[in-house]
Amino acid sequence: MSPDVDLTAPTPGPHPVRTGLLRLDQRVFEAVAARTWPGADPLLPLLSRSANHGVLWFAAGAALAASRTPRARRAAARGLASLSLASLTINTLGKRSVRRPRPVLDPVPLIRQLKRQPITTSFPSGHAASAAAFATGVALESPAWGAAVAPVSAAVALSRVYTGVHFPSDVLAGAALGAGAAFAVRGMVPTRAQLTPPARPRAEVPALPGGEGLVMVANIGSGTSDRVRALCDALPDAEVVECEPADIRGELDKAAGHARVLGVCGGDGTVNAAAEIALRHGLPLAVLPGGTLNHFAYDLGVEDVRDLCRALERGEGVRVDVGRFTSGGQRGIFLNTFSLGVYPELVRERERWSPRIGGWPAGVLAAVRVLRADRHPLEAEVRGRRRPLWMLFAGNGTYHRRGLASGRRLDLADGQLDVRVVHGGRRPAVRLLSAALAGPLTRSPAHAAVQVGRLSLSGVAPGTLMAFDGELTETEGELTLEKLPEALTVYRPLPGDGLLP
């Protein structure tokens, strides 16, 4: 034994700062217990119980999703994802790391106490973590919905101290962990605001107060009635034409003959037809998303009637690129994507089944049927080299992926075709999946990706199926894809006060 060790020395006691914080925690807990809050005795215990196992937040998420607006659905999904991460963290790390006992209930009036007391450790509060995670996740996607959810979240957190099941520090730590989980989810899956494309190049477009001069053609086959009514309420001077899918092109042509601004409400195929006619007549285009996917409108930054009306009334617009394909005597445009190979076959199968079982189930069934079918890859000559291809995809603009988010375009006027090729070979399903996961600018024996302004393909058999913006047609010989830089003028709301960033 070392002679320097003094066995008579006193054992160090608790750290004075920690002791002081615990005493403060206890005092605040007792102060809350001693105070009477008008109307809180029946409400807060009920609210606390409703948040058990996240039931309250799952119900709130379902209510948000039922609003049928893209922003609300994304907010609900982000809130629930944040809640799930917070709960996982609390239950696997938090509760096991700090085994703090629950408060003694003596100071808490009996009417406030929960009928079933929790048996887990006290630090941190899982209810506070879930409440803060859901509210923060919702607010990061939609500040307006976040403001609506925040008071309920705060009340749930307060209820845990009010009912005597947590100390105040438990609640504060849980809330901090919950908010951190929401920001962690945002790091993995960026919000829509983080992915909004730059508002450039700015286009001079007429401001239309009340909508005078706008002719909006709506595809009623896309289920656009609610949006059209909202547009009519917001822009009473606009002319609105509702028509069946088969009449879309004819009505768009008529509208272009006397419109100051051509408007369209429908899915990507309908918007494609409107863009072609707007280009031919030299008109600016106003797009109101009304389909299932609405890739062009969403990448543009127009999600609903409010976005479009703001741009129309202020005269805010940009110029965007257009993709064009030429095959024999056939010519067409695409605003989103063009593809050959497996994907057009999947689109055909999906259109065959969707009237019977609905869009999303039809998409899953189509993918299974197409990938399981016994077929040979497409043969084409690309850049002077003939090769078998399972799929050729060309995007109008470069598709980016951040974190785990699906690909989006951050610049609709970059002058590039985002070309991705999945080479022929064994196991097409594995090759297609690996290409989808690999992202842009990859090269491997299975797939490759490049950005070009023009692409020529020869050796494609006439009659080969091709898809553009969800529409199907057949090739008529050699195929050329090219960009029309900044060819189309479209309305879109500009950030802030309308000035470019």
Image: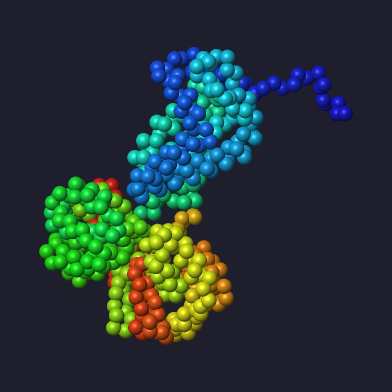
Q: Quadrant of the N terminus?
A: top right
Left or right relative to 231: residue 7: right
Q: Residue furthest front?
A: 356
For residue 460, above or below residue 413: below
Camera-side residue of 470 and 35: 470
x then y, percent, for residue 499: 25, 51
Q: Is residue 50 something one can see in this rendering?
A: yes
Left or right relative to 487: residue 353: right
Q: Is residue 282 something one can see in this rendering?
A: no
Image point (23%, 52%), residue name: 228
Residue 245's image quarter? bottom left
Left or right relative to 265: residue 62: right
Image point (39%, 54%), residue name: 195
**How did the renderer colour the structure?**
rainbow
Camera-side residue of 223 and 254: 223
Camera-side residue of 28 and 11: 28
x then y, percent, for residue 217: 21, 60
x then y, percent, for residue 231: 21, 50
Image point (55%, 33%), residue name: 126
x then y, percent, for residue 219: 25, 60
Left or right relative to 383: residue 251: left
Residue 224's image quarter? bottom left
The number of callouts visible is 0
